[in-house]
Image (cartoon, rainbow, N blue to C red):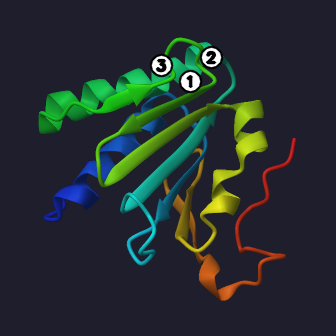
């Protein structure tokens, strides 16, 4: 993890690393800081191909953040592993089972946020400010089956 002076950004970066450790799919970060209605500064969204992988991603996030920053997140959904939410206040992590992610489309619901996509190798691949796009084409990668 690279050193970051802003604690919220450092937390976001650590969580992204933790998700990538367990091979999270289609990892994105939505920057919601400019949206007054948003309950958090960042949403981190990804999915796994099985409920086991979903729970492993969420568990790794909880473990790494506790070890490196001493913070415990509030978690929901670990029992069924279809949509696990880990809440750290300013950073909220959504780890979905693939089909649930397609169904809920959080990227579309929060399309006013600034979206950053991460590739398989863990590098940022695209940063999109979807505010500049029309509603029909939100500037986000449309999730398709």
Describe residue 144's horizontal placement relative to residue 47 as left or right.
right
**Residue occupying the far right of the picture:** 145
Separation of residues labelled 1 and 3 (CA atoms): 5 Å
Residue 40, how many percent across, how many down?
Answer: 37, 58
Q: Quadrant of the C terminus?
A: top right
Residue 132, how many percent across, how many down?
Answer: 65, 88
Residue behind mark 1 = 54
Q: Say above or below: 18 vs 126.
A: above
Q: Say above or below: 61 vs 116.
A: above
Residue behind mark 3 = 56
Determine which quarter of the picture holds residue 66.
Answer: top left
Q: Are marks 1 and 3 in contact (CB under 8 Å)?
A: yes
Residue behind mark 2 = 51
- Residue appearing at x 17%, y 64% in the figure: 6
Q: Are marks 1 and 2 in contact (CB under 8 Å)?
A: yes
Separation of residues labelled 1 and 2 (CA atoms): 5 Å
Describe residue 70's horizontal placement relative to residue 41 as left or right.
left
């Amino acid at each position: 993890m690279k050193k970051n002076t802003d604690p919220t950004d450092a937390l976001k970066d650590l969580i992204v690393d933790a998700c990538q450790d367990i091979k999270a799919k289609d990892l994105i970060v939505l920057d919601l800081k400019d949206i007054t209605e948003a309950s958090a500064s960042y949403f981190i969204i990804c999915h796994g191909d099985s409920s086991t992988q979903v729970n492993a991603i969420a568990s790794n996030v909880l473990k790494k953040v506790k070890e490196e920053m001493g913070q415990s997140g509030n978690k929901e959904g670990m029992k069924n592993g279809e949509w696990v939410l880990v809440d750290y206040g300013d950073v909220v992590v959504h780890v979905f089972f693939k089909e649930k992610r397609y169904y809920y489309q959080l990227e579309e619901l929060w399309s006013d946020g600034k979206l950053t996509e991460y590739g398989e190798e863990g590098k940022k691949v695209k940063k999109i400010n979807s505010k500049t796009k029309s509603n029909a084409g939100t500037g986000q990668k449309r999730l398709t089956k």
